[in-house]
Amino acid sequence: MTLRKWYYLFWTTLVVGSIAGLAGGLLLQWTDHEVPLAGKAIGFSIITMLLGGATISVLSQMGFFAYLIARYLFKGFLRKRWVEDAVQVIMIVIVLFDLVYLRRTPDSGWAAFFILPMVMLAVAWGVAWWKVKLTNASARIPTLFFMIVVTAIEAVPSIRLNNPASTFYMMVPLLACNAWQILILSKVLQTDKEPL
C-alpha cells in the first residue's frame, strides 16, 4: 500500500466516522429528551458529535491495520485455508456468546443482551454479502470475523460501561468505518492504473 492510498483510506474513513458519529448523536438526542438540541449548545453539540465520530474512526483504523498485520502473520502459521476459516468461525461464536453472557447481570433478563450481538451479526452478514459480490466467496469468513470480533474488541470501552447510549454512540461509527474499510480495501489495493 502506497502512502497516497493510505492517505485516501485515512481521510475517507475519517469522513465516514464523523458523519456516522453525527447521525448517531443526533438520533440519541432525538430519542433522549434530557439532552437538548436547540439553543446555544447546538453548535458545540454538533461539533462534539463530529469530533467524537472522527476519534472513533481513528480507533477503527488502528484496529483495521492491526487486523491486517495479524491476518498476514496468522496466514504464515496456518498453511491450510480451512483451518484458518475454522479458527475464525470459532472466535466469532465465542465473541457473540461473550457479548451476551459476560454482560448479563444476575438480576437481569436475557433478552436485552441479545440485541447488540444480533445487530452486529446482521450488519456483518450484510457487509460480508456485499464483500463477496465485490471480490469472491473466500472473503466471507474473514469479513465476518473482522466485522464481529475486531469491532467487539474496539468497542470494549463502551461495552464495559454497560450503558446502552454510550454503546450505541460508539457502535454506529465503528460499524460504519469498519464496513467502509473492509469494502473499499480491494479498490484501494488495485494497481495505479485508475486514480482513486
Image: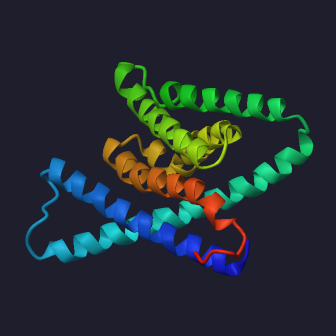
Q: Residue at x 35, y 65 (%)?
A: 19
Q: Position of residue 122 (x, y in %)?
A: 45, 34
Q: Residue at x 47, y 70 (%)?
A: 14
Q: Position of residue 31 (x, y in %)?
A: 17, 47
Q: Nearer the viewer, residue 139 or 92?
A: 139
Q: Position of residue 101 (x, y in %)?
A: 51, 24
Tell whether 180 sits left or right of 49. right
Question: Quadrant of residue 52 in the image?
Answer: bottom left
Q: Is residue 188 visible?
A: yes
Q: Nearer the viewer, residue 10 or 34?
A: 10
Question: Where the N terminus falls, by quadrant?
Answer: bottom right
Residue farthest left in this picture? 39
Q: Nearer the viewer, residue 88 or 46?
A: 88
Residue farthest front in this picture? 193
Q: Position of residue 121 (x, y in %)?
A: 49, 33
Tell whether 67 sits left or right of 121. right
What coloring was used for the rendering?
Answer: rainbow
Q: Is residue 104 above or below residue 78?
A: above
Tell whether 140 sits left or right of 38. right
Q: Nearer the viewer, residue 20 or 53?
A: 20
